[in-house]
Image (cartoon, helix red, strand yellow):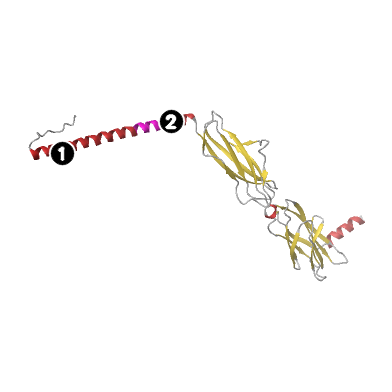
Amino acid sequence: MKIFSLITLCVITSAHKITQLKVPLYADPRRAAELSCHFEMDDQKLHSVKWYRDTQEIFRYNPSQKPPIRLYNASGITVQSGDCQTDSCLVRVMPPPLATRAAYTCEVSTEGPKFQIARQTKHMTVVAMPEKDPVIIGARKLVRPGEQLHLNCTSDYSLPPSDINWYIDNELQKPGVWERTELSAPELGGLRASWRILRIVVPPTASGALSVRCEAILLVEPPVIRDVTAIVTIHSRTQLSKYVSNTDSNGDTEKLKIKILIRWTYIVNVKNIIFLVDLGAHLTGNIRPFHYSPHC
């Protein structure tokens, strides 16, 4: 009974509390992340505010000390600055260039003799989102049955690097031995691009079109997916026969047009010659005039 009363007393007298803790769910390794802790002291006097990354202290604010703010760089993280008021503390940290997930804890304690402590924790994942959709290279618009296509899908730079999946008509394509996802060299902040090859053999009896989709997945919680689709039309033999037939028909038409033009030119030239002969006969009187018959 005495133990219960003691616990109840502690709960009632612990008046100070953390009212809001802001920790980004995702942090880009190329930019500083802001963490803020807001609290209420009521009638208690503030002793210190501390920030922890997992179990390591990275920041301390103690208003009774000089200087009141101390920064601690640990585990590859860089604490750039901090700013505290009577009811809040804000910290700016530069995340490490690694795809990691860490717990960030704000701890607010009161002065003695009670030295009561309030804590809150949130997690932050270091990740750089891709800014562009993936790109497919090698997808021709028109192919014939039996042809081979070698496609390349390249993702945008991200951290962690994207994993790539291929789909044909919404069916997942299992990668071959040499069709695994490849990675580029790391850029600023540890970001990498990724790519994967896909080889397609168009079936001899295929017709219509193929929908080829590349999916770049960032394996975080929740996953981030960006994709792109290419439509490949299959030139079937029926279409080819029709095309050839139309070509031959057009060729015959052109030949007929040429024959008519030659015939018309021939008739005009003959008329001109006969006209000159008639004119000479009238002028000299020595040649008997004659007339052109259109049946000649």
Going by the numbered disc 2, the residue's amino acid type is Lys
Left or right: residue 248 versus residue 1 is left
| Residue located beneath label 1 in the image | 276
Q: Residue at (18%, 37%) from the top-left corner?
A: 273
The percent position of residue 67, horizontal first and vertical second, equals 80, 70
Q: Residue at (81%, 65%) from the top-left corner?
A: 48
Q: Residues within 10 Å of mark 2 (few under 14, many from 20)?
A: few
Gap between marks 2 and 1 measured at Cα: 52 Å
Quarter of the image with the N terminus in it: bottom right
Magenta part mainly helix, strand or loop?
Answer: helix
Q: Residue at (43%, 32%) from the top-left corner?
A: 243
Quarter of the image with the C terminus in it: top left
- Mark identifier at residue 242: 2
Left or right: residue 146 versus residue 50 is left
The percent position of residue 20, horizontal first and vertical second, equals 73, 60
Identity of the residue furthest to the right in this view? 2
Residue in the foreground of this view, choosing between 1 and 242: 242
Is tag 2's residue or tag 1's residue first in the polypeptide sequence?
Answer: 2
257 falls in the magenta region: no
Q: Is residue 27 visible?
A: no
Tell me if residue 191 comes above or below residue 232 in the rendering: below
Residue in the foreground of this view, choosing between 244 and 27: 244
Q: Is residue 240 visible?
A: yes
